[in-house]
Each structure stands twice: as C-alpha cells, then as structure tokens.
Amino acid sequence: MQYERYVSDLYYQKEGLMIHNMQNLDPHEREITSINLQDYLPRNLRPMMHSIKLYHKGMHESDPVKELDVSSVINMKVDYNEDSDSMINLKLTVVLKPYEKLLLTYRINKMLRNFEEYPNDVMRGFNVPHMPVYYSFNTGDKDKIFSANILIQTPEPDFSMPFNVNAVTCVLFGSLFINTLTELYKNYREEKIEK
C-alpha cells in the first residue's frame, strides 16, 4: 500500500485540512479489506472530527470520485482533552481493490497559545510524529507501514511586543533617573558655589 499524509493550508491560517491519501499497490494484487489509521496531534492542533470525509477513486483515471458514507465505514476513537495532546484512531472497513485510491480528510483548528507556552524556535513549527498504519488483505495477511512526520506551522503572537514594552519602560525609567540625578546635582553644586 502506498500512503501519504499532509496538511493542506497556509501557515498563517487558523484552520487546516489533514489529508490521508492511500492507494492499494500490492504486487500480488490482493484486496485490502480494513485499514487502521492513527494520528497524534499536539495540544495546539485540535481535530474537528465532525468534518471527516472519505472519498473513493477507482483504478482508472476515467472512474468518478465517490464520497462514501462515513458512519457506515469508519469506526472512530478520539482521545481529546482541552489541555493535552489528542490521539485519533480510525478503523476503515472498506474494500480497496488493486490500484484503487482512498482519500480521508478532516479539518484541524490551530489554536493560538500564550507566548510563554511556545518553544524557543517557534518559527520552525510543530512536529506531528509518524504513526503506524495497519492494514489487512482479503487473504487474511496483515501488514503495516509508517506515516511520515509532518511539520505544521501555526499562527503565533507578536513575540517582539514584550521586548518593545521592556525597551519603552527602560527608557522612561532611565529618563526619570537621569533627570532626578541632574536636579539633585545642580542643587548640590549651587549650594557648594554659594559657600
């Protein structure tokens, strides 16, 4: 089986589309009868599983793309907590004949966090680790492959703001300190000259 996963979006958008693309390229031309996908998302990426869609494409280019009924094909288990990472387990029970393709999509929401919660190299993005993909054939054989790592960029706050506030505050305190010392020294100097 050939498998790829990626996120289709622009880095500054608050939403993206997680895409799983599968094709049965078995050299023995066996049919795939079930596929078990897993995704592990960091806590600033939230899956919106109500938007899940599954498309089927035949082996020929002229075959139409059909949208499959998700409720009858996918068994879904999502471990989701607002303050922790998400684990998604999707079991697809669909027959995938040789050279046929499946495309599974769902939306993800990219959360904006407090600036203290971002790593030092925030412009690099966040890693979505590789996960196993299990699949079984109509002959009873089972196999697995691993999805690739994904680097997802999320919107981030303006990290120059704390520096700007700090710089302005230091300039104000510095001006106040210098003016105070100047006035005190002037008074001291005038008193000394008069004596």
Image: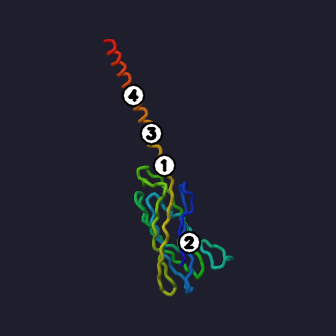
Which of labels 3 and 1 is toward the front? 3
Cα gap from disc 3 to disc 2, whole angstroms: 47 Å
Mark sitting earlier along the chain (4/1): 1
Tag 3 secondary structure: helix
Percent x, y of residue 16: 54, 60
Image spot of residue 147 (x, y percent): 49, 71
Query: Does label 3 or label 2 sit earlier along the sequence?
Result: 2
Q: Give whichever of 111, 188 is nearer the camera.
A: 188
Quadrant where the C terminus is found in the figure:
top left
Q: Residue 135: percent from the left, percent from the top? A: 49, 79
Looking at the rendered structure, the secondary structure element under dot 1 is loop
Residue 153, compared with residue 176, is above or below; it is below
Looking at the image, the residue that sits furthest to the left is 195
Question: Which of pointers 2 and 4 indicates the residue nearer the eye?
Answer: 4
User: Residue at the right extreme?
Assistant: 62
Disc 4 residue type (three-letter): Ile
Q: Is residue 33 left or right of residue 183?
A: right
Q: From the viewer's perspective, is 9 left or right of 111?
A: right
Q: Marks 3/1: CA distance?
A: 15 Å
In primary-sequence order, the first of circles 3 and 1 is 1
Give residue 178's mark.
4
What residue is pinned by disc 1? 157
Q: In which quarter of the image is residue 57?
A: bottom right
In the image, what residue occupies the spot 48% across and 67% down? 149
Q: Dot 2 corresponds to which residue?
A: 21
Indicate the amino acid at tag 2. Answer: Asn
The residue drawn where x is 46% and y is 40% is: 164
Residue depicted at x 42% and y 32%? 172
| Residue assigned mark 3 | 165
Q: Which amino acid does label 3 sit on?
A: Val
